[in-house]
Amino acid sequence: MGNFNSTSQESFILVGFSDWPQLQVFLFVIILIFYSLTIFGNTAIIALARLDLRLHKPMYFFLSNLSFLDLCYTTSTVPQLLINLHGLDRTISYGGCVAQLYIFLALASTECLILVAMAFDRYAAVCNPLHYTTIMHPLLCRALAISSWIGGLVNSLIQTGLVLAMRLCGHQINHFFCEMPIFLKLACEDTKGTEAKMFVARTIVLVCPAVLILGSYAHIAQAVLKVKSMAGRRKAFGTCGSHLMVVSLFYGSGIYTYLQPVHRYSESKGKFVALFYTIVTPMFNPLIYTLRNKDVKGALWKVLGRGKDSG
């Protein structure tokens, strides 16, 4: 903590949305509702995927990983935000801030990579349906998931390590959680070298996965257009379209925040953009991926005791 050089106490004040006092009660209610729905929806997906044999498939294996990630990284930021909005406590220790930064970056980076695995799964299902079970072998699924987790943890370790090496000035963070661009704004030194290293890491975790996902869905679109059945086309486009909606929300807001130069980063806009990838996307994931899914609906009715096991 020797690099902290702002005040006599090693802590930060999270400004949050206190500069918009008229919005705080509204945001508190909305975020509390969204967070509750996120907890309920993602927990339900994880439980259903474990309880129903029909959901013991690669798609739901990756979806369970995604739901777990959403639960964890939303919980790493939202409770602090709710406390902040309630005006109870706006301080966070330096150690707590660094821990929050590492955990959030690790989970968000892992989600970027898990979304690639999910896109590959959909590519195999649509473009190679006859060989799908052979391609998406359980060992490959586990390997993809483990690689995503390791990649996310390593990326976060690198970027958090770069932050710890910087000397920081000031104790006020104009955000609702400890996020990377804010740390760079607090640096008492030239950060061009650090930014360049971070840009490489972020390109690998954000841009490369986005390109791979778009490429896989371009192939999926070509395959779907060859399907003669209109019902088949609608089903394929519905499934893939919902995935792309999640990807657009998540990667779009993430790229806006992390790939622009620090001197252009607007703290005020950044707070509202961050709401998308910390609160909105995790809440919509369960709905988008399961709304039209007959297997998930069947599993839910079965668990609730209102349906019959049709195999």
Image: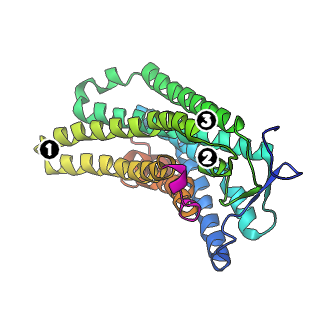
The disc at residue 225 is 1
Of 26 and 291, the residue lying toward us: 26
* Secondary structure beneath label 3: helix
Magenta residues (range): 261-270
* Residue 188 on image: x %, y %: 70, 47
* Secondary structure beneath label 2: helix
Is residue 264 a member of the stretch shown in magenta? Answer: yes
Query: In the rendered structure, which amino acid carries the disc numbered 3?
Result: Gln
Q: Which residue is mark 2?
A: 180
The disc at residue 57 is none
The disc at residue 159 is 3
Q: Main secondary structure of the magenta part?
A: helix
Q: Residue at x 71, y 36 (%)?
A: 164
Query: In the rendered structure, which amino acid carries the disc numbered 2?
Result: Met
Answer left or right for 305 relative to 21: left
Marks 3 and 1, how far apart at CA: 42 Å
Q: Name the quadrant containing residue 206.
A: top left
* Residue 126 on image: x %, y %: 25, 36
Q: Inspect this view and state whether residue 13 appears.
A: yes
Is residue 194 a member of the stretch shown in magenta? Answer: no
